[in-house]
Amino acid sequence: MLKSELAGYMEIFHCGEQYAAVSRELEMAFGIKGAELRALINALRRDGVPICSNEKGYFYAETDAELLRTIRHMSSRIAGISGAIRGLKKARTRFDPGQTSLPMGGGDDL
């Protein structure tokens, strides 16, 4: 129920990026914490509700361009997170002292 209330509220009061609402405003309006708000926004987006975000806050998309900017921003975040995951996987080697590593040149210098 809260999900549909949030979607309706966003569409009526925060339609278009010029009417973006900061997280704190929405948290107070719905009596929820930030993590719950983010989960609701994520669920709405998965359901196809056009909730966008930018540095000013969350808003209901008024144009396709607003949706595309949000999609591009989210895609760049995914790329950054993927890079961080790759780096952390590389770092795991320091926690496995028993792991044997072979020379990259084919192992002839053993």
Image (cartoon, rainbow, N blue to C red):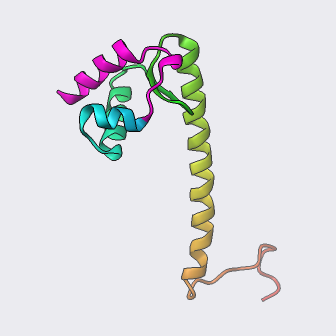
What residue do we see at 45% from left, 22% from top? Answer: 59
Q: Is residue 94 left or right of residue 28?
A: right
Tally the numbered discs: 0
Query: Does 42 sit above or below residue 33?
Result: above
Q: Main secondary structure of the magenta part?
A: helix
**Position of residue 57 measured from the top left corner of the image (x, y, whole percent):** 49, 31
Is 71 magenta? The answer is no
* In front of the other: 72 or 93: 72
Query: Does 35 sit above or below residue 57?
Result: below
What residue do we see at 37% from left, 21% from top? Answer: 48
Query: Does 1 sit above or below residue 80?
Result: above
* In front of the other: 80 or 96: 80
The quadrant holding residue 79 is top right
* Furthest residue toward left: 1
Q: Where, quadrant-wise, is the C terminus in this rendering?
A: bottom right
Q: Is residue 37 left or right of residue 94?
A: left
Q: Which residues are magenta?
A: 1-22
Query: Does 85 sit above or below residue 61?
Result: below
The quadrant holding residue 106 is bottom right
**Position of residue 20 measured from the top left corner of the image (x, y, whole percent):** 48, 24
* In front of the other: 55 or 1: 55
Q: Where, quadrant-wise, is the N terminus in this rendering?
A: top left
What residue do we see at 21% from left, 29% from top? Answer: 2
